[in-house]
Image (cartoon, rainbow, N blue to C red):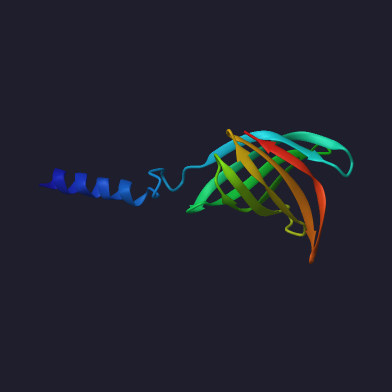
Amino acid sequence: MKKLAFTVAAIALVIAGTTGTGRAAEDSATLNGEYVWENGNATGDLEAVFTPSGEGEWNVSFNFTFRNKPHTYSGTAKGNLAEGALQGTVLNENKKRTFMFEGTFEDGVFIGTHKELDGEKSFSTGTLTLR
């Protein structure tokens, strides 16, 4: 009887830890690609880690090196990581600069743009690709 109760409890924990997609809630997707920073004509490798936070919603961290310094910009995103639109907003490490990104996944490749938000104004800062 104790074995049965333990088994039922273990199954309940597994079910509680999954989302509607069948993936564990803590599952994340790591995509790699490149960014282009138009102001200064710089490019570099980009790693994006997406952690599910709801249906079609993600917490995201962009990891990259700019001017020989590593950076992690974090925020949120909405959309699909396989096909269709994806957009989001991230803040730099000290949370004083806000950037928005948007684009589309097609055949597993994301092609998008990024821009810096300054109050109600925004200005283009470049492009990014992810796979």
- 41 on left or right of 2: right
Residue 82 x %, y % = 54, 39
Position of 67 with respect to 93 (left or right) is: right
Q: Position of residue 105 (x, y in %)?
A: 61, 40
**Near-viewer residue (5 or 18):** 18
Question: Of residues 44 and 101, which is closer to you in this image?
Answer: 101
Classify 74 as above or below 28. Answer: below
Residue pictured at 10% horizontal, 47% vertical: 1
| 110 w.r.t. 77: above or below | above
The picture places residue 63, in percent across and down from the top left corner, at: 68, 41
Which part of the image, by quadrant, shows the C terminus? top right
Instruction: In the displayed orientation, state which residue is furthest to the right.
Output: 40
Residue found at the very far bottom of the displayed protein: 120
Who's the residue at 58% across and 33% down the image?
Answer: 107
Compared across the picture, whether 105 is left or right of 68 comes to left
Quadrant in which residue 32 is drawn: top right
Question: Does residue 93 appear in the picture of this structure?
Answer: no
Q: Is residue 26 left or right of residue 70?
A: left
Q: Residue at x 58, y 44 (%)?
A: 84
Regarding residue 66, the answer to whether it shows in the image is yes
Which quadrant would residue 42 be assigned to in this image? top right
Residue visible at 50% across and 54% down?
Answer: 53
Where residue 85 appears, as percent x and y from the top left, is 61, 47
Q: How many marks?
A: 0
Q: Is residue 115 above or below residue 81?
A: below
Q: Is residue 120 above or below residue 128?
A: below
